[in-house]
Image: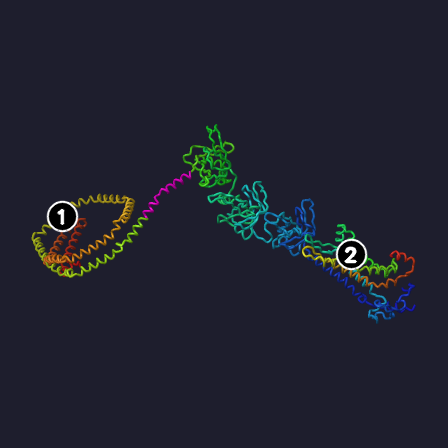
Amino acid sequence: MSDTDTPTSVTIESARTSLWERASVVWLVPMGALIIALAIAWNHWQSRGPLIEITFSNASGIRAGETEVRFRDVTVGLVEHLTLEGDMKNVTAEVRLDKDVAEYVDDGAVFWVIRPEVTTRGVSGLDTVLSGVFIEGDWDSEIGASQTEFVGLENAPLLSPGEEGLRLTMRAVGEDGLSGDSPILYRGIEVGAVGPSRIGNDGSTVLADAVIFAPYDKLITSTTRFWNASGFSLSFGPEGASVDFDTISTLIAGGITFDTAASGGVPAQDGDRYDLFDDESEARASLFSRAEGPEFELTLVFDDNVSGLRPDASVELSGLRVGRITNLTGLVDPDRFGDNRVRLLATMALQPERLGLGEDGMDPIEFLQRSVAEGMRARLTNASLLTGGLKVDLVTLEDAPDATLDLDAEPYPVFPTAPPELTDVAATAEDMFNRVNNLPIEELLQSAIDFLNGATSLVANEDTQSTPKDIRALLGDIRGLVGSDEVQAVPEQLSTLMTQLGGVATELNTTIQQLNEAQLVSTLSETLVSLQGTVERANASIDGVPQLVERVDGVVAKLETVPIDQLTVDLSELLKAVDRLIDTPQARQLPADLSQTLTEVAAVLRELREGGTVENVNTTLQSASDAADAVARASDELPTLVDRLGNLISQAQATLTGYDGNSQINRDARTALRALTEAARAIDGLARTIERKPNSLILGR
Amino acid sequence: MSDHSDIPSARSRGMLACTRCGAVWPIAAEGTDCDRCGHTLHSRDTKSLQKVWAWWIAGVMAYIPANLEPMLKTRTLVMESESTIVEGAFDLIHHGDIPVALIILIASVGIPVAKFGAIAYLAFSVNRQAKLSAHGRQHLYELVEYIGRWSMIDVFVVAILSALVQLNAAAQISPGPAALTFALSVIFTMLSAQSFDSRMIWDTDPAPNDPTKKDPHLERH
C-alpha cells in the first residue's frame, strides 16, 4: 500500500495537537447559551417575590395565572394557583408578589376583588369588564410584621387606597333604618360614604360603617348629628307648599347628611359611633336630649274630645319634650264614667331618660306617683297657633282635685288629666284688629294737616313779614324823640329840681331836730324795755317751734304727694290749649295787631313831640327841681341826722348786748341793727351822691 | 481503515477534493488553501464531530425554552392569551382542527426531535459499528439536511401573524420568547447537520455490498 505515509502523518498531527488546538470554536455557542440560560434563571430566581395566600369566599372571576394583584392600579403580583380549602368553605388564591413590594405587605394589608358594579351611585370597575377582575390590595408605607395568609374582604373598603379620612359607625335609631352604600352629603357635597348596613346585635338597630373623607373629617365633632336625607319631604306652610330633597341621587339611592349645630364639641376619633336620625328636626332636638332610652307608656283619658291631637304629638314638661303620643282612640264607657259621652283615650310614651331618670335614677313609676300627688296633670294645650295642632303638657296645678296614678289599669297605667287650656286665637286676633280699626287715625292726621296749614299761613302772612319793618320805624321815632331839644334840656331842669330837694331836706332836718327834742331816745329806750318783755314772751313761745317744724314737714310731705303726674297731664293739656290758641284766628291776627300797635305808638310819640307834652314834662321837672332844692337843703342837715342815728344804734346795740348772746331775738335784733346801719350808710351815700351828682337822681347812675 | 473498502476513495489514492469546488489535489495539500476557490483543503474535517456536537447541544438547549415559553401572545378585545407550541396545538385539537394541529405538531415537535435524534445517531455511528448501512446513513443525512429548513415554518407563521394582526385595540398578535429560541434551535440544528462531514460515514463502512447490511438499507427506503 502506497498510502502508509499519509495515515502516519495524520496520526502524528492529531497526537501532537493539544486539547485547545483540537477544540472547535463552535463550542463557544453552547457555552454561551448555557451561560445565558443560567443568567436568566438566576435573575428570575433572584427577582421572585414571596408567595402569599388570600382566602375568598368565592373565586368569581379569579383565574390562576391571569388575575393580577394591584396596588393603586399598579400590578404587583399574579395569582399562581387557585385552590379550594380543605373544608370546602373558601377559595384560596396563591399570589406571587413582586419582590419590591413584598415587604410592605404586612399584617395590616387588606385585599378585595374589583368587579364591575352598576349601582345607583354609578358604575365602577368598568375596565374589569374586558380585562377580567383583579385583586386590589391596600397597605401602608410602613413595614410591619410579615404575614403570608390573608382573608380577602367581601367589599371594597370605604376609603380607597391612598385616601385619608375618618372612620365612623352609624347607628340608625329611627324607624327609617339606614340605606347602606349611600353617600354622606354636607351642603350638597359628597364628603363621605356609608358602607353596607347590617342589623346590630340587639336585633333592633341598623349599623353601618361610614367614612368622612379628609379634609372634611374636621367637620365632625361630638356635637355633630347625622340624619337621613333620602327621599323628599313635602310640607305646607303659610308660604305655600314646598317639596324638599337634597339631590337626585339621594332621592334614588338615599343619603345621609349632617350638621354640627352646637359648638364646643371635641373632634371625632376613628371608630366613634353616631346615631342616625330620621330627619333634621329630630336630629337637632336630640342635641339637648342625648340619651334615647326605652319608652314608658301611660294612658290618658281626656273628658273633652278636642280635635287637633294627633299621634306623635309631643308630650312636654316645662317646655321640654319628654315623650310623645303614640295612639289615639275614642272611649265610651258608661259603667266607668256614668254617661255615654265619647272621651279621648290617648296613649302617651314617656322617655324616662329625658325626665332625668336614668338607669341608676329613680323608678319612673315612683317618680310619677309622687308627681301626681303633688298635682301633676296632663293637659291639652295649643302646639301651634297656625295649624291648630295640640300637644300634651305635663303641668303641676295647685288646685288640682286629688287623683292618683292608676297602676292597675290595662294595658297601661292611667295618668290623671286636667281640663284643656286652649286659646281661641282667631277671636283674640279679630278683637285686636277691631280695636286698631277704631283708632281715630284719620282725624288725627286731619288735625296735624290743619295745624301745619295754619303755621304755614301764619309764616306766610304779609303782616308777619312786615313786622320787622314797623319795629325799625318805631326805633327811628324813639331816636328822634331822644334827640329832640326838649329831652336834651331835661338834665338842667333836674338840677333845679335837686336844689329844691335840698330845701325839702332842710325841712326834714328841722323835723328831725324837733324829733330829737321830743325825747326820741328815751322813748326808744322805753320801747326797747317793752321789747324786752316781748322777747321774753317770744322766748316762751319759741317752745312751740318744733310743732311748727313738724307742720312744715307735714306740708312738705303733702307737697311731695302732690300728683306730679296730674300736673304733667295738665301741662300737656295746657300745651294742647296753646296749640289750639295758636291755631285761632286771633293768634294769626296777632302780628297784624302788633304792627298796628307799633304804628299807634309811633303816632303817640309824634303827638308827644308835637303836642307840647314835653314842655309839660319840663314844667313838672321844674317843680321837681324846686323840690330838689329843698332836698339839697335838707341834705346839709343829713350828716347830723346820720350821727344821731349812729348814736341811736350804738345805744341800741349796747342795750341788746344785755340780752342773751345766743338767743334768737338777739340775733334778729343784731340783724335789724345791721340793716339799720346799712340803711344809714345808704342814706349817707345817697346824700353824698346827690351832693356830687344831682342829675344821677334822674339818670339813675 | 480504507483497506476494507473495495471502492477506492480519494484518500486511499493519495488525493483530496476541495469540498466547495470539487477540485482534486494531492493529499500533501492538506491544510492549505484551494488554488481555485481559496477554500481550506482537508482530506477529513477532524473537528467535524466536535462542531456537530457543539451545535447539537446548543440546539437542544434552545429547544427547551422554545417549548416551555409562549410562542404566540394573542391579545383581543376581551382576552389576552399566551400559548406555547404544544398548548396551541392542543387548543386546535380541542377546537376540532386536527389536521392543522398535526401539521404544527409534526413541524414544530416531530421534525426537530427527529433531527436531534438523527444527527446524534450519525455522529455516534461514525466511530462505532452502526446497524444502519453507510448508504442508509447517507440517505438519513441528506434527509436531515433537506428537511431542516422546513422546521422554520413555525417561525414564519409567527412572523407573518405578528406582522399582519396588528389591529390595535381589537386584536394583536406578537411573538413570544419561544419564537426566538425556536428559531435559534432550528438554526443550530441546521449548522450541526452541516458541520457533519458525511465522508466519515464511508470511512468506517465495512462492506456496502454486503447483502446482510442491505436489508435495513432497503427498509429505510
Q: Is residue B18 above or below residue A297?
A: below
Q: Amino acid at mark 2?
A: Ser
Circle 2 SS class: helix
Q: Quadrant of residue B168?
A: bottom right
In the image, residue B149 lies at what x, y percent? 79, 60
Report, in whole angstroms, how far the alpha carbon at label 1 lies from the one at label 2: 170 Å
Q: Chain of mark 2?
A: B
Q: Amino acid at mark 1?
A: Leu
For this view, does A519 lie left or right of residue A289?
Answer: left
For this view, does A593 lie left or right of residue A437?
Answer: left
Circle 1 SS class: helix
Mark 2 burial class by Cα count in 10 Å: few <14, some 14-19, many 20+: many
Q: Residue at x 33, y 45 (%)?
A: A443
Q: Nearer the viewer, residue A228 or A411?
A: A228
For this view, does A239 lie left or right of residue A658?
Answer: right
Q: Is residue A522 above or below residue A31?
A: above
Q: Which residues are magenta?
A: A424-448
To which residue does mark 2 refer? B108
Q: Is residue B180 visible?
A: yes
> The N terminus of chain A lies in which quarter of the figure?
bottom right
For this view, does A593 lie left or right of residue A322?
Answer: left
In the image, residue B89 lies at what x, y percent? 76, 53
